[in-house]
Amino acid sequence: KNKDGRMNFKEVQRLLKMMNVDMNEDHALRLFQDADKSESGTLEGEEFVLFYKALTQREEVLSLFQDFSEDGKKLTLLELVDFLQQEQLEDEGTEELAMELIDKYEPSETARARHVLSADGFLMYLCSPEGSIFNPRHQVLWQDMSQPLCHYFISSSHNTYLIEDQIRGQSSIEGYISTLLPPCRVDCWDGPNGEPMVYHGHTFTSKIPFREVVSTLGKYAFKTSDYPVILSLENHCSMEQQEVLAQQLKDILGEQLLTTTTDGRVPTQLPSPEELKHKILLKGKKIGRLEDTLDGPGDEAPDVSDDDNGAEAEEERRRVKVGGLVLPSGGTQHSSALQKDKESLAQALSDCVVYCKSVSFRGFQEARSHSRPSEISSLSEAKARKLIRDAGNEFVRHNAWQLTRIYPSGLRTDSSNYSPQEMWNVGCQIVALNFQTAGTEMDLCDGLFSQNSRCGYVLKPPFMRDKDTLFNPSDPDSWEGPGPTTLTIQVISGQQLPKVTNSKDGAIIDPLVRVEIHGVPADQAHQETKYIENNGFNPRWDETLQFQLHVPELALVRFVVEDYDKTSRNDFVGQFTLAFANIKPGYRHIHLLSKDGTSIPPSSLFVHIRITEPPGPEQD
């Protein structure tokens, strides 16, 4: 505090409070005196390092280290190999891996030269990406990308341009830059001087020129990944401005805009993300059928869908009334323009729609007999829920050959979200969420799409890609597994957990850990540890939680740390969510994320994970 390069005990105590450590004064004083080698009653540079090391000594890691080390001081190469095989269940090339870990994480040159790992090196390995709960092999592009588009879950945002709420929020180009992954949605309306504008119709959100949105799209579309971006066009424009939309799309995006099928032929199934690399696909209404465009313009009556513009706009109008807001002047003209919209679609804009023609959903029977793979239906969350309840298996089969998009209810004026999990359980690919709203739903979305190089595409399990599948998420008799998989999680300790935002000065958290399973209805579950009083720095739980997973292929696991409060709701401290398929067994660190999904180093949980598969037929 007084810049003299030393810390007296009072200053150390103040620092501990800031670091979320509520330490017994005698214990703190004992550590302080041990570190004060010069016996000056203050700690200088090196002495403070000693004090900090004693403070952050991880007993639980040290005793694990000593379990495998014969002399308690180092792990030889063979001892490290034993640990990697027995505890971390690393099965191939363990000796090479052990050498690699020593080279990478052992701080002492002498130890590195002798191919041994000290306790410090061991801790560094456990805190590294290789010691993380997330399987590093699944962080890179690890899935087959050559299957039809409908065989993937596709990361998607709704009202991408909004950064606040749906009624009065600011529209922003930033919204697009931060969520530019596969599908993003653009609401287009007539603007002044023949320039179409993007904003949330019938509301007071601000406006952005369409030209700017498309330029941003062209510039940032493939920064995150090479795989296709789907642009969902909600078109409320007049014929004249639709021509402008089409012209701007073609001029600005050029080669990036897909304007014909990949091989020039009528598709019998959707192309793969691999075939559509670096392409922007337009989702919207289309005149006639795709085959007419390929054989030359058709002369039949325009088969123009009213799907998104009808259903979603209708819901938005109802929502605006519910919100007690008066429509901006011209609201009635918008709805009549909407009506006219159904009959009048500019041919130039229609021609830009290839694989994602919006059609109204009129039942699975109808879709099977009349639909094509290049058509896509949008359903509100309520309609989707009803179909899941009434025809779960048909829904899964439908999604094995055609794309489905789900959008949030218009009544969610606060931009809240529904759970994407129930939609993924039936194989819906494009589950649109309000990306600007943090919470469990976005954690699940980020958790699912944090794998596969974050490219925005995650391959569905095999039983959801088969048109004749019997799978129904709500019916246990339709799951063809040998029995449930057991997930056992020992929650050992926490490290340097952050303070709760806006907490009182000097307040120390009482952390507890909750583990949630999100999956098919039978797998939905959560359990939590007891809370530890006044310790956000190095709490120890040593508690074991166990779950049975019937359909592990669809399960997501969410770890949440909360600050226990006996009088009101617990406060959120941090979380981490990942697909069950991406979990590495053994002793692992979970690096926590904040409410909005950003990392908060060095906060972590230390756990031991065991996965017990049911015995296969040959083991019975």
Image (tube, rainbow, N blue to C red):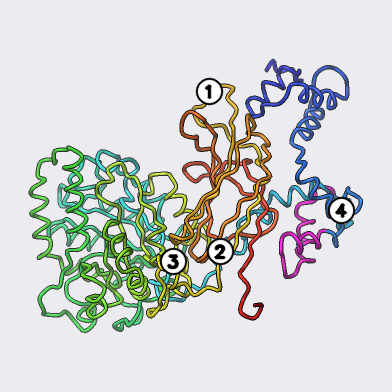
Specify which label sits upstream in the sequence, 1 or 2. 1
- What's the distance in space between the residues labelled 4 and 1, CA to CA? 44 Å
Specify which label sits upstream in the sequence, 4 or 1. 4
Residue 220, how many percent across, how many down?
41, 56
Q: Which kind of residue does numbered mark 2 sit on?
A: Ala
Q: The residue tagged with tag 3: helix, strand or loop?
A: loop
Q: Nearer the viewer, mark 3 or mark 4?
A: 4
Q: Are marks 1 and 2 in contact (CB under 8 Å)?
A: no
Q: Which residue is mark 4?
A: 69
- What's the distance in space between the residues labelled 3 and 2, CA to CA? 22 Å
Q: The residue tagged with tag 1: helix, strand or loop?
A: loop
Residue 126, how many percent across, how many down?
71, 51
Q: Which residue is mark 2?
A: 581
Question: Looking at the picture, does residue 55 appear above or below residue 205?
Answer: above
Specify which label sits upstream in the sequence, 2 or 4. 4
Q: Which kind of residue does numbered mark 4 sit on?
A: Ser
Q: Which residue is mark 1?
A: 504
Q: Is residue 37 magenta?
A: no
Q: Horizontal placement of 350 versus 40: left or right?
A: left
- What's the distance in space between the residues labelled 3 and 1, CA to CA? 47 Å
Q: Horizontal placement of 43 versus 480: left or right?
A: right
Residue 565, how many percent across, how many down?
52, 31
Q: Nearer the viewer, mark 3 or mark 2?
A: 2
Q: Which residue is mark 3?
A: 227
Q: Camera-side residue: 443 or 481?
A: 481
Q: Camera-side residue: 399 or 141?
A: 399
Q: Nearer the viewer, mark 3 or mark 1?
A: 1
Crowding around mark 3 (Cα neighbors within 10 Å: few <14, some 14 to 19, many 20+) is many
Specify which label sits upstream in the sequence, 3 or 4. 4
Tell me the magenta residue range: 80-108
